[in-house]
Each structure stands twice: as structure tokens, then as C-alpha cells.
Image (cartoon, rainbow, N blue to C red):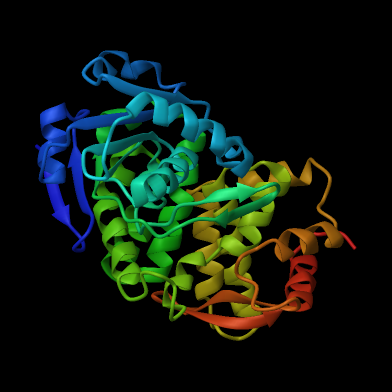
Amino acid sequence: MEASFKWDVTTKVEFLKKLPSVARLGEALGFMPEKVLVIYDRRLTSLGKWLGEFPLTYSLKCGEGLKDMRAFSAHIHKIFKLVTPFSGRSLCVVAVGGGTLGDFAGFLSSVLKRGVPLVHVPTTLLAAMDSSHGGKTALNVGSFKNQIGTYYPANAVLIVKSLFENLPQLQLQSASGELAKMALVAGGELYRKFFDAFKMDLEHIWELLPDAIAAKYKIVEKDPFEATGERQILNFGHTLGHALESYYGIPHGVAVGEGIIFALNWSAHQGFLRGDEPRHLVQFLERSTSFLGAKNFVRQHRTMSRSRLSKLIMEDKKLTDARHLNFVFLEKVGTPFRKVVTIESLLAESRRQGWTSR
């Protein structure tokens, strides 16, 4: 059975059992474009038969290198040769891949003819619950991540269960980190479902996806262009998480999971999160989602220096000035809040929790 949800006026989210036909794409869009360009991760060998339905396809090697601003020019020239002639309404881009491909294809769609229709078909659970939604696109400038981008919500996000059936355990763990973030930030029924009976397998994650996605859109719709700062609570766990991801090469969701534990411990240390709750939350996350494995991995490698962490934080978009940044704390489950902290205080806390050397 197919499920269909419309979270806001611009993006339709559908849950499907199998990859959509050309006609099914038209149904999701509400119109049939003259041309459909499928941009896909070349490692997805299982797409072969399905890709045969589409005359225009463009394969990419995915990863952070795909988002390099210097590489974008070469790609755009090749794509223009492939799809010309076209108008802003006649071409639809279908992005089939994980987060980096979605960022690339989203930015591409937003600037082609000042905007062409876009459909995301995420192939990782992390992308299915996070980066495919909310309209953020991004390219990197050298080592500075996500510095060039636009806000460009997809016309549709099609979440296909069959694409996730053979994901490795690390992908499930990464998705669990993002799911834990949404459960703690949103609270309510999502939190109860996650913390009462969560198992790190596809069926449990699939069951929670609609609630997690709905919770994200509820926050995004309050502040779609990050004008008021309300949307920044979605960065819970990301400040240290992004640094760990960059330095150790840990998958994004796993790094965010460690960043969540860091934020919970700091919230407790600051007196914002009181009683036994922080200890219980941290123990649950370490036990049920295997975030502890990431810290053991880190301990086997060189501990990040204070100066290195400082440099990584200085590259973060959450800075308010050269000495301060917005950090997301938790007062209680379902009540995150932003607070401006000094970079020095974050560095001191990272040392206290054992993430950095002197």
C-alpha cells in the first residue's frame, strides 16, 4: 500500500514500495514535464532497469567532493548539453541518491533557468528524514562546508522502501542519530515511540519516518528561511557533530548522535536539564543506538586538539561573530532552546567531556 502526505504548500511527501514510473512521477508533481533528467549516484547498480525508462540520465560520483564549488561549472556545462533546449517549466530534475547528491541536485535545480521542478528520491534513510526536506541546498568552498546555497523546496519527495532494504548497519546507525535528534527536539508521540521500543532495524525506522518528517516540517514552516532563528533548533547535536564528522570521517548521523550526547551532558552541567533525565537519556542512546561505538573508534585514533576543534568551529555557519556561536541546549524533552555561547566555553566543555586534548 502507498501512503501519501502533504506537509506544506510546496512539497508533497509520499511513501512508496517501489521506484515510481514516469507516469507516477507526473502524478506526484501534478503535471507531466516534457523532459525528466534523472541525476543519480553511479554506485546504485540496482537502478539499471528503472533508469531505462528515462531518456535523460546523468550519473555522479557522490561524496563531499561532488559539492565542491570548483567542480560545479564542469557539471553544469555537461548537463546543459544533455538537456538543451529546455525551459524552466519543461524540465524536471529527479535526484536519486543520498545527502550530497541531494544538495548538489537541489542547488542545480534552483539555478537552472532560475528554477526548474525538483523531485527527491533519497536512497539513504538519513536523507529520507533530513536533507531531502526543508529546501536547503548547498555547495562547499574548499574545506568550508555548505557555504554556497539556496532555499529551494522540492516539488515532491518520494521515499521508496525497496531502496533501503540492503543498507549496511552503519547506515541504520546514522539514521538513528538523526531520528534521536528529532525525537528529543519534538517530544510528544515521536519521543515516546522512539524511546519506548526503538530497534535499529529498517522496520522500526520506517515506521517512525512519517512522524519524524512531520516534526521537521512543523519546525521549518515556522522559519523557512531561517529569518527568526527558530529553525536553528534543528541543529541540536550538530555543533560538535559536524566537527567530529570532518575530523574523523564518521558518518553524519553517527557524529550527530555523539553531538547529541555532548549537548545533553552540557545542558545538565549548565543546570538546564535537571534530575536523572540526562543520565537516562545518555544511557539509552549509548545502549540502543550504538553511539558508544563511535567514541571507542575515536579513542583508538589521535584525539582532536583544542586548536583543531577551534578551527572547525570557526568554519561553522552558526557563528554569531568571531568569538560566539548559537548552541542548542535542551531544557527538557521537546523543549530545545538556542543560547549564544563563547567559543572558549565550548572548547572548555569539549575538554571536560574528553573530546579534545590540551
- Asked whether, in this view, residue 243 is left or right of residue 28, the answer is right
- Asked whether, in this view, residue 285 is left or right of residue 300, the answer is left
Q: Vertical placement of 221 versus 71: above or below?
A: below
- Asked whether, in this view, residue 299 is left or right of residue 114, the answer is right
- Across and down, in percent, residue 243 comes to 68, 55
Task: Pick out the residue farthest to the bottom.
Answer: 271
- Across and down, in percent, residue 209 comes to 29, 50
Residue at (24% x, 53% y) in the render: 210
Q: Nearer the viewer, residue 175 or 62?
A: 62
Which quadrant of the structure image shows residue 133? bottom left
Quadrant of the drawing holding the N terminus: top left
Which quadrant of the structure image shows residue 159? top left
Residue 331 in sight in this render: yes
Residue at (81% x, 59% y) in the render: 356
Task: Pick out the residue farthest to the right.
Answer: 358
Which quadrant of the structure image shows residue 118? top left
Residue 187 in sight in this render: no
- Across and down, in percent, residue 88 comes to 27, 45
Residue at (71% x, 44% y) in the render: 248
Residue at (43% x, 23% y) in the render: 59
